[in-house]
Amino acid sequence: MSVEVLDGATIVNFVEDEEAFTRSVRDRFARLDTNHDGLLSYTEMLKELQSLRVFETHYGIDVKPNPEEIAHVYDSLFLQFDHDSNGAVDLEEFKAETKRMMLAMANGMGFLPVQMVLEEDSLLRKAVEKEHSSAKTKQLLN
């Protein structure tokens, strides 16, 4: 994990870079697709859904919610990804929903910088890395 500063533009710029975003999403999808069938089952996506930490309420302190509530929330999140309701998520569904979620996050953050703790392989971390590499490239060109 690392502590990074980012804003909505960091995320938007990453998502709009089709090549970098697609590569990162494809890599993430491949790591989740443990049986290599090109589809993500609920079981394969569960770890990713849990990483969203929807039950974290206060600075990293987790609450003990009702197990039925947990199941309902994760089922609902999975359905957000499963656009065609076939019980599995393909790469295009995964990419489209990931993009939608990241842009919603960017919209919520706005233009004010926010300091966040990011996991090393998270898509937000990839967005920050892209921003840093773009800044370095600009410095070298000037």
Image: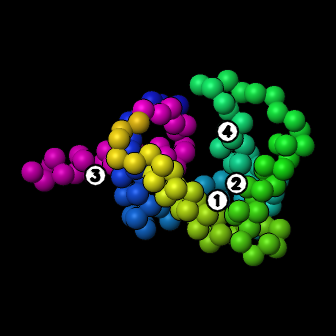
Q: Which mark is residue 138?
A: none
**Mark 3 surroundings within 10 Å by alpha-carbon count, few (fewer than 14), some (14 through 19), many (20 or more):** few
Query: Mostly what secondary structure, the magenta segment?
Result: helix
Q: Where is residue 93 drawn, in percent x and y?
A: 65, 69
CA separation, marks 2 and 3? 28 Å
Count the numbered circles shown: 4
Q: Which residue is mark 4?
A: 53
User: What amino acid type should be assigned to the residue bearing mark 4?
Assistant: Arg
Q: Which residue is mark 2?
A: 32
Magenta span of residues: 115-142
The type of colouring in the image is: rainbow
CA separation, marks 1 and 2? 5 Å
Residue 29 falls in which quadrant of the image? bottom right
Q: Which residue is mark 3?
A: 134
Q: Which mark is residue 29?
A: 1
Q: Nearer the viewer, mark 4 or mark 2?
A: 4
Q: Where is residue 67 drawn, in percent x and y?
A: 89, 38
